[in-house]
Amino acid sequence: MRVVAARAVRVAAPLIVTALAACDNVEWGGAAVHVVNPPPAGAGDANVPDPGTVAGLGLPTGRVLFHVVRNPDGTAQLTPVAEISGDSLRTLRRPAGVAPQAYEQRFRQAVMDVNTEFVLFRRGAEVGTMIVRAPGAVTPCGVPTSSGQASTVAAAAAEREFLAFRRGLAPEVIGEYSPPQVEGTIQRYASLIAERLVLQNGLQRPRSWPGAQRDLQAMNLVLGGQSEMASTYLVGDNLGVGPADPEGYSVFYVASYEQRAGYTPVYTEVRDYDKTGKGAPKLVDHLNWNGAGGAEILVQVFGTQESWYEAVSRDKGSWRKVWEAGRCREPAPPAARSIGAAERTAPASR
C-alpha cells in the first residue's frame, strides 16, 4: 500500500504542472519543468467531452446520442441525434448569430474529431465500433455529420442502423446481441393492426396492405416471451425526405404480444397529411441510453425537406412520446394524433 501511495504522489505533480497551460516553463521545487500541450482529441477512451470551453457557441456539454447508418460498401454515416440531459434529450442546433463555420469546426473538434472511436449498439446490446475518418455533410440545423468505417460482430453483420456513443461515454449494457426474428405471428398481425388504426381514424384502406407496408421490425423490449414489433404503413408517400401526396397518410405503431389478444398496439402515430402535412415515422432502434428504467425507442420521421427524431419511452405503465427534435427548414405541423392501446374511436366516413 505504501508503494502505491508513493507512486500516486509522484504522478500528481506532473498532472498539476500540465494544468498550467499559460506557461512554457515552470519552477517546481527548484527544478525547471517544460510544459507540453496535450495532444488533440482522437481515438481512444473519453471520460467527458469538452465542447463547452468556448462560451456562446451552444455546443453540447453532456453525452451525445448518435445514429449510424452503414452503407453497402462498408462505410458508415454518423449523425448526432441529441444531447442526453439527465433522463431527457436536448435538440442539437447551431444557435442564431453563431457563424456556421465556427460552430461546425468546434463541434467536430469537441465531439467527433477524425480518428475518434464510437461504440455501436443494436437491439440493446453492444455490437461493434466505428472510427471517424472524414467530415460529412451538415444537417439543416447546422450540426455536422461524419463518415467512417464500422465493424460489428458476426451476428450483426447484416444490420444497417445502429445507435452509438463516443468511446468512454457509452451506457453499460448486459447481454450479447441476439437478433429477434420477424416470424409468422408478427407477419400475420402487422396488417391487421394497421387496418384497425386506418379505420379508426376515418382513412381509406390502401389498395394493397403489403404494398403499403414500408417497414416491419421485431424488438426485444422485454426480455423473454414473444418479441414486440414496430411497423410503418404509408399511402401516397415513400419512406424518405421528399414530397408526398396531400391526400396520403402514415401509420406507425409499436405492438406487444398478449397471450389472449395476440398483438396489441401500445404506441401509435397516425398522420392524415391533408391535416398534418407529411410525416413518415420509422423505428431506428431501442436502448436504455440514460441508465434509468427500461429501454427508450428512437424514431426517425421523414418530412418534405428534412428528417427529425423522436424518443418514445414507457412512463407509468404507458408508452408515450417524451421528446421531439426541433425542425430547421419547415414549421412544425400540427401534432400527430397518438392513440394509446386503450383508446378507441368510431370509424368516420370520408
Image (cartoon, rainbow, N blue to C red):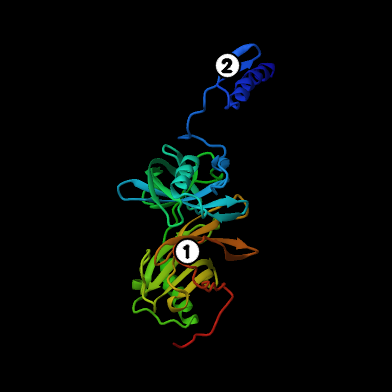
Quadrant of residue 184 within the rendered picture? bottom left
- Residue sitting at 65 percent across and 21 percent down? 8
Q: Left or right: 255 with respect to 76? A: right
Q: Is any part of residue 85 visible from this angle?
A: yes
- Residue sitting at 59 percent across and 13 percent down? 32
Tell me the number on the disc at residue 202: none
Q: Do the residues labelled 2 and 1 touch (CB within 8 Å)?
A: no
Looking at the picture, which amino acid does disc 1 mark?
Answer: Met
Residue 253, horizontal then vertical, whole percent: 49, 68
Mark 1 — residue? 229
Q: Residue furthest bottom?
A: 349
- Residue sitting at 60 percent across and 24 percent down? 15
- Residue sitting at 55 percent across and 21 percent down? 24
Frontmost residue, 240 versus 164 = 240
Q: Is any part of residue 183 visible from this angle?
A: no
Frontmost residue, 108 versus 168 = 108
Secondary element type, mark 2: strand
Which badge, 2 or 1, is on the more N-terminal residue?
A: 2
Looking at the picture, which amino acid does disc 2 mark?
Answer: Val
Q: Left or right: 20 with respect to 255? A: right
Q: Left or right: 19 with respect to 331? A: right
Distance between the alpha carbons at the discs numbered 2 and 1: 62 Å
Secondary element type, mark 1: strand
Taking 38 as reference, is 286 above or below it?
below
Residue 233, horizontal then vertical, whole percent: 41, 71
Residue 171, horizontal then vertical, whole percent: 56, 45
Mark 2 — residue? 33
